[in-house]
Image: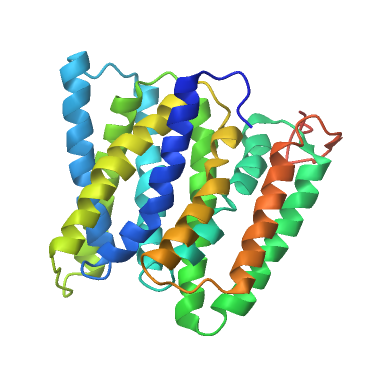
Amino acid sequence: MLPHFSRRHYIAYASICLIWGSTWGAIRLLVRDVPPLRAAAVRFFFAGIVLLAIALYRNGKLSLTRKQWRALIVLGFTMVGLPCGLLFWAEYRISSSMTAVLFSTCPLFVALFTPLLTQDRVPRRAVFAMVVALGGISALFYTGLSLSVYLLLGGGAVMLAVVISSWSAVFAKREISDVNPLVGTAIQFCVSAVVLFARSLIFEQNRPSDWNQTSILALIFLTVFASVVAFSLYYWLLKSMQAYQLSTTNLIVPVITMLEGALLLREPVPLTMIGAAVLVLVAVGVVLKADDDKPLSLELEGPAVKS
């Protein structure tokens, strides 16, 4: 999966999988006591301050072009602010295991957005695999989330976050691959914190926060490890990996999340969820190995897409 990379790349990749595999459970614990948008805003505010301080200490100043500033502000909305707000909101309604399984479709959408943004052709096997995976997700929605509108809205929020995050991953690879990871991540977190705080003031002004030991520990984990460490590693790896390669962390994250949810949070893991997870992971694996396959010509309002 990760050929021709150094040991540091493997360690960084594995660290992201382990950290983000635990993120869903930590979010689940945090939003039990703190409104989801407020929780996400506080998380990214502190993470942004920490990263900005480190970046300024190491570099002395922020050397960015106008184009890079514009791209980072956009990513503050689309890579972090909107998706994480949606995920925090969704985990108030569905289990962390269900959230992770739905989010594991991210590589499929990255594979779809890559040709849309780069004018490349889509391998035929990748297109077929996407159709199969989306069928599996549809089945999961029908059996696991159609019991109530409450659950269905939670699942829909996760899928919207998936689409936004996938577009952002390809956009980031194209626009900010030469930006210092610490600087880029810090600016995105600061932008997202402002967005989330504003939304929280509008939608959560009458909801109290209970900052107990559990919620504080969950916040510390999400701020330090899931934000400062994991996102910095993510953008560092994005300099030497393709967006679709790095998105394969989502192959491993659901397994870690389901194990932790079952063992630590006592969340049920029904057979339908396991079956959907297996189907999605197999389909994603096909997408990632389809680079050398015969491409499928897709006309997308312009030049033919090519690989």
Q: Nearer the viewer, residue 160 or 305?
A: 160
Percent of width and height locating residue 154: 45, 70
Left-right relation of 40 to 237: left
Can you give x and y, in whole percent of width and height, for residue 260 in the image?
Answer: 42, 59
6 shown above or below 250: above
Left of 45 or right of it: where is 303?
A: right
The quadrant holding residue 59 is: top left
Q: How many marks?
A: 0
Q: Is residue 51 visible?
A: yes
Q: Residue at position x 51%, y 67% from top?
A: 156
The extreme front residue here reads 263
Point out residue 142 in the picture as x, y percentages from the top left corner: 63, 77
- Against 50, residue 59 (above or below) is above
What residue is at 48 percent from the left and 24 percent from the top?
9
Residue 27 vs 179, above or below: the answer is below
Q: Residue furthest bottom?
A: 147
Task: Pick out the residue farthest to the right.
Answer: 294
Colour setting: rainbow
Residue at x-position 56% and y-position 53% = 104
Q: Is residue 114 left or right of residue 78?
A: right
Q: Position of residue 94 (x, y in %)?
A: 44, 72
Query: Can see residue 177?
Result: no
Please indicate whether residue 239 sits to the left or right of residue 62 in the image: right
Q: Please tell me in which quadrant of the rendered image residue 87 appears.
A: bottom left
Q: Quadrant of the N terminus?
A: top right
Query: With respect to residue 104, does 51 lie above or below?
Result: above
Quarter of the rendering occupied by the C terminus:
top right
